[in-house]
Amino acid sequence: MDVIDKTAEQNLKDLILENPELILRDADLMRALLQADRSTAGRNVVDLRAVLVERLEERLDKLEDTHREVLAAAYENVAGTNQIHRACLSVLEPESFASFLDVMTHDLATTLAVDVVRLGLEAPGAEAGSGLGPEGPSRNVVIALPDGGATAYVTQGRGMGARKITLRQLAQASPDLYGEYAPTVKSEAVMMLDLGPGKRPGLLAVGAEEPDRFHADQGTDLLVFFTGIFERALRRWLA
């Protein structure tokens, strides 16, 4: 009988040594061990209270880290929402197309924290990459795209439908679209534009010098909302 008991005891000991988490994660077992510790005071036993406190501290640290991450994400989301709201208001205020383009390249670029903003419109009769804007500083803010050029630019020739919002890093920005800014643009957000029945699609591209400013893992919900507002504002001037 003693042999069986010792064998079972050794097996239990081996199991615990191989998987100590079985004990440390079980609240009932921990309470039983702590009670046994108090009842055998003065004997050669291990004080498990220190282990329990250490475990509780680890869990508290993890909870605090999670709490900070949640708060940071919430603040970032609020800041992003406010940013997009300001961008929407800025494109709704202009009373002329020239003013709209000026707001797009200055106020909008500042609000979205980007370095360059370009509007691409399909114009098969014009030379691809040429300026379509009114004479003056806004001439090259509106860029001519070939027939199907908006979709082709977004998909980069891949056989798939163009997404409403495309965020990506760039090894080489398009000189036709960004002109003199092309060498410095390292990431971009491209928004496909629906300009209404009977109108060819267009695109709004915002480029940044920072490679990490836009990347495929970012959310696009706020930009989808902004794109809807921008489309409606632009349709007034292209009617």
Image (spheres, grey):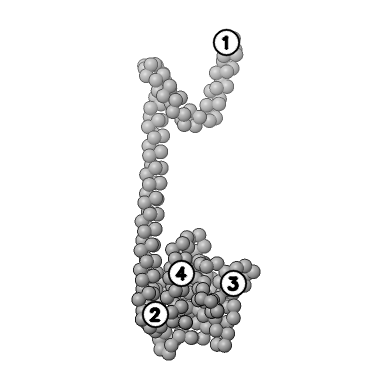
Amino acid bearing label 2? Phe
Amino acid bearing label 1? Asp
Amino acid bearing label 4? Gly
State the residue position of label 4.
228
Task: Point out residue 31 in the picture as x, y percentages from the top left corner.
Answer: 41, 24
Q: Which of marks 4 and 3 is nearer the N terminus?
A: 3
Q: Which of marks 1 and 2 is nearer the N terminus?
A: 1
Q: Which of marks 1 and 3 is nearer the N terminus?
A: 1
Can residue 125 be seen here? The reply is yes
Most foreground residue, 117 or 86: 86
Q: Which of marks 4 and 1 is in front?
A: 4
Most foreground residue, 100 or 180: 100
For the residues labelled 4 and 2, say whether their Cβ atoms are less than 8 Å apart: no
Q: What is the crowding at mark 1: few (fewer than 14 residues within 10 Å), some, or many (at least 20)? A: few
Task: Point out residue 224 in the picture as x, y percentages from the top left corner.
Answer: 47, 66
| SS at circle 1 | helix
Residue at x 56% of width, y 25% of height: 14
Q: Distance between the residues labelled 1 and 2?
A: 92 Å
Residue at x 40% of width, y 77% of height: 104
Q: Which of marks 2 and 3 is nearer the N terminus?
A: 2
Q: Distance between the residues labelled 4 and 1?
A: 80 Å
State the residue position of label 3.
156
- Position of residue 232 relative to residue 216, above or below, is below
State the residue position of label 1.
2
Task: Point out residue 133 in the picture as x, y percentages from the top left corner.
Answer: 45, 85
For the residues labelled 1 and 2, say whether their Cβ atoms are less than 8 Å apart: no
State the residue position of label 2.
100
Q: What is the crowding at mark 2: few (fewer than 14 residues within 10 Å), some, or many (at least 20)? A: many
| SS at circle 2 | helix
Q: Distance between the residues labelled 4 and 3?
A: 23 Å
| SS at circle 3 | loop
